[in-house]
Image (spheres, rainbow, N blue to C red):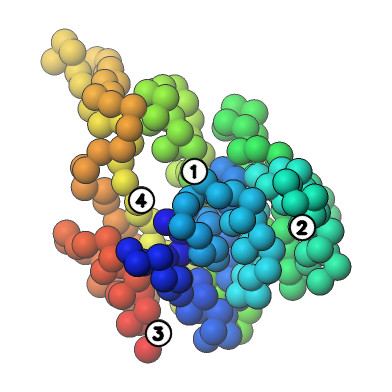
């Protein structure tokens, strides 16, 4: 489900809660912007695969100010014949089909840089760190902002059991985090949290010769696993994000900081 509880009742995401506090909000991903993680912050649907319905929810959401990712086809090549991008631009959104334009500060900015998911790192290059830096500068304001950035294709690489793909995506995400930390250093009232929704692939990195001379990647599955995922935090309130916690505690801890 997307943005719903177990009884199919819509619930507010932290993005919506922050928007109601007067903060700007944004989403950046290397997948469809309608994919499960980014969609969960703005859409309400009983099935994560109902991409066209999710796109309609995104297009009509008044709580989000910035969207960057892929999935253009869900907005334009639709069964109902509607062009949601045209509808969004008519209602005040600024739309671009590539990140690399002379994009100044926009009140409502949507960049859909591919009909499908964005290409893998080798083709898209520095898109994610560049998009994140653009988002941070566009959302920065006196009332504060909430930004969710997903290194979406780390998961894709785990599903594919492809170690080269995985290392590329992890390095790309690392570069993205470096850009975020640089922003946070210049804007010290910024809380940065890095975590994941799950592990994919059951990855183990082994040293087959026990000589520490080379490593091999071994995947136990092409699916999700129940392995614990880490959470890292820096900035005001970061001391609350330590130890083992239930995933549903994260939003509670974040929102408590703003009560």
Q: Quadrant of the N terminus?
A: bottom left
Secondary structure of the residue carrying tag 1 is: loop
Q: Residue at x 28, y 26 (%)?
A: 221
Residue 210: which quarter of the image? top left
Q: Is residue 234 visible?
A: no
Where is residue 250? Give x, y as percent: 31, 67
Name the residue nearer the viewer: 211 or 241.
241
What is the C-alpha distance between the residues marked 1 and 2?
23 Å
What is the C-alpha distance between the residues marked 1 and 3?
28 Å
In primary-sequence order, the first of circles 3 and 2 is 2
Q: Is residue 225 visible?
A: yes
Q: Which residue is mark 3?
A: 258
In primary-sequence order, the first of circles 1 and 4 is 1
In primary-sequence order, the first of circles 1 and 3 is 1
What is the C-alpha distance between the residues marked 4 and 3?
22 Å
Q: Quadrant of the C terminus?
A: bottom left
Where is residue 231? Give x, y as percent: 29, 56
Q: Which residue is mark 4?
A: 196
Mark in the foreground, 4 or 2: 2
Question: In this rendering, would 99 be left or right of 217?
Answer: right
What is the C-alpha distance between the residues marked 1 and 4?
10 Å
**108 above or below 170?**
below
Question: In this rendering, would 117 be left or right of 89?
Answer: left
Where is residue 96? Give x, y as percent: 79, 52
Mark in the foreground, 1 or 2: 2
**121 above or below 31?**
above
Q: Residue at x 30, y 75 (%)?
A: 253
Q: Which residue is mark 1?
A: 152
Q: Residues within 10 Å of mark 4 (few under 14, many from 20)?
A: few
Q: Which residue is mark 2?
A: 84
Q: Residue at x 33, y 64 (%)?
A: 6
Secondary structure of the residue carrying tag 4 is: loop
């Amino acid at each position: 489900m997307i943005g719903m509880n177990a009884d199919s009742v819509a619930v507010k995401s932290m993005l919506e809660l922050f928007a109601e506090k007067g903060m700007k909000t944004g989403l950046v991903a290397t997948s469809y912007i309608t994919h499960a993680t980014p969609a969960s912050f703005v859409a309400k649907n009983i099935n994560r695969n109902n991409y066209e319905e999710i796109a309609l929810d995104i297009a009509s959401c008044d709580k989000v100010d910035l969207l960057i990712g892929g999935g253009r086809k869900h907005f334009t090549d639709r069964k109902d014949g509607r062009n949601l991008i045209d509808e969004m631009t008519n209602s005040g959104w600024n739309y671009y089909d590539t990140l690399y334009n002379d994009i100044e500060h926009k009140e409502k900015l949507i960049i859909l840089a591919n009909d499908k998911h964005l290409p893998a790192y080798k083709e898209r290059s520095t898109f994610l760190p560049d998009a994140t830096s653009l988002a941070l500068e566009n959302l920065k304001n006196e009332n504060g902002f909430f930004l969710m950035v997903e290194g979406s294709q780390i998961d894709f690489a785990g599903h594919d059991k492809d170690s080269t793909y995985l290392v590329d995506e992890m390095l790309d995400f690392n570069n993205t985090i470096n850009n975020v930390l640089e922003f946070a250093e210049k804007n010290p009232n910024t809380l940065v949290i890095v975590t994941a929704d799950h592990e994919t692939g059951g990855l183990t990195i082994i040293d087959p010769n026990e000589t520490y001379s080379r490593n091999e990647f071994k995947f136990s599955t092409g699916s999700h696993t129940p392995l614990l995922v880490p959470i890292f935090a820096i900035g005001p309130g970061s001391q609350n994000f330590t130890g083992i916690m239930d995933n549903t505690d994260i939003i509670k801890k974040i929102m408590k900081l703003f009560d």
